[in-house]
Amino acid sequence: MQLSVLDPLRPGQAFPPLERALTEPNGLLAIGGCLSPRRLVNAYRHGAFPWFNPGEPILWWSPDPRLVLFPQSLNVSRSLAKTLRRGHFEIRRDTAFAEVIEACAAPRREDGGTWITDDMRAAYQTLHQLGVAHSWETWQNGELVGGLYGLAIGRVFFGESMFHRATDASKVAFVDLVRHLDSWGYQLIDCQVSSDHLLSLGAEDIPRREFAAALAVLCKQAPHPQAWQI
């Protein structure tokens, strides 16, 4: 099947049907385009997200199955619950978005590379300024030690990346975020691709068609009016 090529000068261009995504590599849907706010929001609402290495063209993905977390299915282990009760971390929201995405972009020990390019960082910081992208942060002794960022559209939160510099720092941020999302009426958290870390927290794989059907409904519904106001 021929891969769809997006026009960088048409940010409102529709994405191809998800059924046209490749099975190998799993979920590769389209190539090219741009990282404008309009294009990015359209992608997430459609069930796609950008992921590419430095020097590569923009690649858009929609894997099947899709890893998601339903807020009510959040699983907190005994050890993590103990960490939460101890209150060693201070939780903040949207106070250090640039620092969070910079930390997430830092090369991992395994391969020394990163997929969060300078263009990606700039694009998501623009979405943050527009109130679409958010960070959830853990602080300790006045230092940022963990957190995550993602997009909030309708009643769906699209998680992008997380990091930690202290044990359980990213998990604490994630659990606190999920509990707030649940209280605000969010129905779905997109975790993109399967990982043992997220599976241990209650995430599960669902067929892409079910994910797309949920987005078609939930992205149009507004969350609680106090969402993101704390």
Image (cartoon, rainbow, N blue to C red):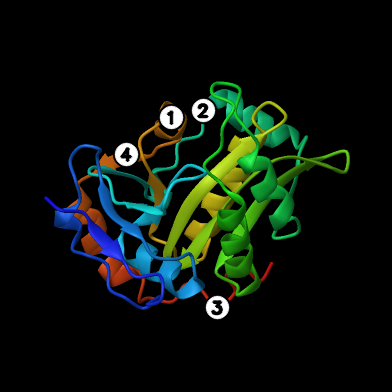
Give the image location of residue 49, x and y in percent: 39, 55
In three-dimensional space, the C-alpha distance between marks 4 and 2, rounded to whole angstroms, equals 16 Å
Q: Which residue is mark 4?
A: 204
Q: Residue at x 44, y 42 (%)?
A: 74
Q: Earlier in the sequence, mark 4 or mark 2?
A: 2
Q: Residue at x 25, y 46 (%)?
A: 27
Q: Earlier in the sequence, mark 2 or mark 1?
A: 2
In three-dimensional space, the C-alpha distance between marks 3 and 2, rounded to whole angstroms, equals 31 Å
Q: Residue furthest front?
A: 55
Q: Residue at x 54, y 52 (%)?
A: 179
Q: Which residue is mark 3?
A: 225
Q: Earlier in the sequence, mark 3 or mark 1?
A: 1
Mark carried by residue 77? 2
The foreground one among 160 and 34 is 34
- Label 4 crowd bin: few (<14), some (14–19), many (20+), radius 10 Å: some
The foreground one among 218 and 148 is 148
Q: Is residue 155 left or right of residue 230?
A: left
Contact check, label 4 and label 2, Cβ < 8 Å: no
Contact check, label 4 and label 1, Cβ < 8 Å: no
Q: Residue furthest right?
A: 141
Q: Is residue 172 visible?
A: no
Please state which amino acid type lies under the numbered disc 2.
Ser
Q: Is residue 80 above or below residue 92?
A: above
In three-dimensional space, the C-alpha distance between marks 2 and 1, rounded to whole angstroms, equals 8 Å
Give the foreground label among 2 and 1: 1
Q: Which residue is mark 1?
A: 200
- Label 1 crowd bin: few (<14), some (14–19), many (20+), radius 10 Å: few
Contact check, label 2 and label 1, Cβ < 8 Å: yes
Give the foreground label among 4 and 3: 4
Q: Is residue 219 visible?
A: yes
Please state which amino acid type lies under the numbered disc 3.
Pro
